[in-house]
Amino acid sequence: MFLSLCYFVLTTLTGVDGWTYHISSKPMIWEEARRWCKTNYADLVVIRSHEENAYLNNSLPERDENYWIGIRKNNNNIWTWVATDELLLENESNWATNEPNNYNNNEACVEMYVKRLHGTGKWNDYSCQRSKTALCYKASCEPDSCSGKGKCVEAINSTKCECSPGYYGEWCESVVGCEEVGHPSQGFISCSPPSGNFSYGTECKFGCEEGYQLVGSKVIQCTAEREWSAVPPRCEVVQCRELESPVHGSIHCTHPLSNFSYTTECDFQCAEGFKLISSSKLLCGPCGQWNGSQPECTASCEPDSCSGKGKCVEAINSTKCECSPGYYGERCESVVGCEEVGHPSQGFISCYNSSGNFSYGTECKFGCEEGYQLVGSKVIQCTAEREWSAVPPRCEAHPKPALRTEVVAAAAGGGTVCLYITIWLSRRRRKMWKATVFFNT
Ligand SMILES: *[C@@H]1O[C@H](CO)[C@@H](O)[C@H](O)[C@H]1NC(C)=O
Ligand SMILES: *[C@@H]1O[C@H](CO)[C@@H](O)[C@H](O)[C@H]1NC(C)=O
Ligand SMILES: *[C@@H]1O[C@H](CO)[C@@H](O)[C@H](O)[C@H]1NC(C)=O
Ligand SMILES: *[C@@H]1O[C@H](CO)[C@@H](O)[C@H](O)[C@H]1NC(C)=O
Ligand SMILES: *[C@@H]1O[C@H](CO)[C@@H](O)[C@H](O)[C@H]1NC(C)=O
Ligand SMILES: *[C@@H]1O[C@H](CO)[C@@H](O)[C@H](O)[C@H]1NC(C)=O
Ligand SMILES: *[C@@H]1O[C@H](CO)[C@@H](O)[C@H](O)[C@H]1NC(C)=O
Ligand SMILES: *[C@@H]1O[C@H](CO)[C@@H](O)[C@H](O)[C@H]1NC(C)=O
Ligand SMILES: CC(=O)N[C@H]1CO[C@H](CO)[C@@H](O)[C@@H]1O
Ligand SMILES: [Ca+2]
């Protein structure tokens, strides 16, 4: 086992370690030197800057055989830093004059001259099978040096963290945060991680209570710029389609939350003569749907729609009356009438009208004074055709005594009975004689 002779441990005033360099006490061939470095430290040295090269030039002790450094030709014959597998950049090389010369076609490794007459601090390609002092380095950056949130950058005297976006602090141990957000009114929030600190990377999801809908982004993230990826959303009450008063009807709504929105309740009524199709009450549900279709008012027949004088027929916007004979008008409220009739001369008339003067259905009875006799119909009716059922009769003077006497009608009972006795005279004379006989029974 070889022991390291010297430590070139350089620390800053704050105690932050940078790289440390270590050299072997005995020379060894390149492969062995690398193995030794890897076993005890990190690897053969990687010289990243001229400043670092100068530092080694000044600090390393003199060695006759010089030092192996961590450059070697790769499979494609290109100089490569073995520790990092990075190619050697032209501007970062320190070749001595006329080097690398690949002497004897056998120089695949690199040594560094230190404390010698010519080319001190410079590099030379050399046979890997020669023995030289191993120049190793050890990094002080560890995988978690920057809390896993940044890149650890090493210098000779220090390490420094270059923090990833959103992290800060010497070791990237702090994280930026966004403004606190709460649950929206009528809604809820759920953030992960649920620390409640709203730091970079926090994701918050939103939702709304029943009957409310989210307006805005459902999910927001706290960005490295200390801003949320979007404005936190709102919960707005769900709207239903606006309802209107039905034709021939009215609407009355209560809006506990907002106009025509969740929980709004509307009652419908129809004007007289109309009735509702479907429910009289609608409710706006949590998904913005009414629990039924907009009601309509349809005309409806009532028992007295046609004044009891016709048949009522229903249509959508109106009802229609099909009036019985003798009646007319929209609701069969009018009755047809016949020509006025008066009493015959030397006679009298008695009419019974059910619905007006000489209107349809009126029945008139006639009689004649003593000594006169009725000629024509004793009773006439006003027909639906606005005509009397017969021509009103006349009263004519009583003729000579009759050849025949006929008892037309007789009735017995309490009181006075009017009996008509018609005596038929000769047809040729065409005379009637009438007598009123009072019977006392
Ligand atoms: C060498 O050049 C590369 C770009 O080609 C640059 O990134 C690097 O910093 C340079 N190194 C020095 C020591 O100037
Ligand atoms: C190494 O150091 C010597 C003396 O200190 C100096 O003359 C030489 O230029 C240095 N070489 C490099 C490559 O810095
Ligand atoms: C490293 O730190 C030491 C002591 O603080 C200082 O003397 C030296 O110049 C520093 N080296 C570099 C390369 O900064
Ligand atoms: C939240 O932030 C407070 C104050 O910045 C801090 O004390 C606490 O540790 C944080 N909690 C978490 C879980 O990050
Ligand atoms: C509800 O309707 C009334 C009357 O049309 C109106 O003045 C009011 O602004 C509306 N309210 C809302 C929240 O839309
Ligand atoms: C709608 O809901 C209300 C209240 O529950 C109810 O009274 C009404 O009958 C419903 N309407 C329909 C068409 O189901
Ligand atoms: C009913 O009346 C309304 C308005 O008065 C009209 O828009 C509609 O077309 C009518 N419907 C029918 C079937 O006549
Ligand atoms: C009956 O006749 C009288 C007199 O002409 C009139 O004033 C009245 O309005 C009529 N009545 C009806 C029901 O037609
Ligand atoms: C018996 C009867 O109904 N008479 C009526 C006939 O019509 C007139 C006018 O409407 C009424 O005044 C009568 O009473
Ligand atoms: Ca050479």
Image: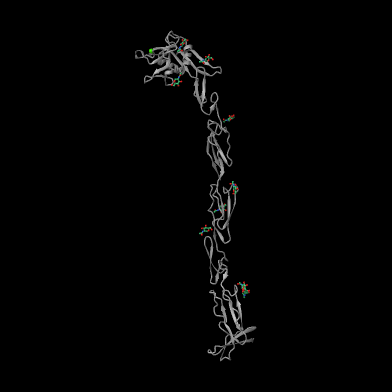
Please name the colour scheme applied to the rendered image.
one colour
Residue in the foreground of this view, choosing between 28 and 101: 101
Assign ligand 8 to one image quadrant: bottom right
Residue in the foreground of this view, choosing between 379 and 428: 428
Report whether 433 appears left or right of 4: right
Toward which corner of the image does residue 281 lie, by quadrant? bottom right
* Position of residue 419 measured from the top left corner of the image (x, y, whole percent): 60, 85
Residue at image coords 60%, 77%: 351
Visible in this render: residue 21?
Answer: yes
Q: State the quadrant of the N terminus.
A: top left
Visible in this render: residue 129?
Answer: no
Q: Is residue 258 above or below residue 271?
A: above
Toward which corner of the image does residue 195 lie, by quadrant? top right
Q: State the quadrant of the C terminus.
A: bottom right
Residue that extends furthest to the top in the rendered view of this protein: 117
Residue that extends furthest to the left in the rendered view of this protein: 104
Q: Is residue 283 above or below residue 128?
A: below
Residue in the foreground of this view, choosing between 308 and 340: 340
Toward which corner of the image does residue 182 lie, by quadrant? top right
Residue in the foreground of this view, choosing between 336 and 406: 336
Q: How many marks?
A: 0
* Position of residue 385 measured from the top left corner of the image (x, y, whole percent): 53, 74
* Position of residue 29 measured from the top left corner of the image (x, y, whole percent): 40, 13
* Position of residue 39 measured from the top left corner of the image (x, y, whole percent): 45, 18
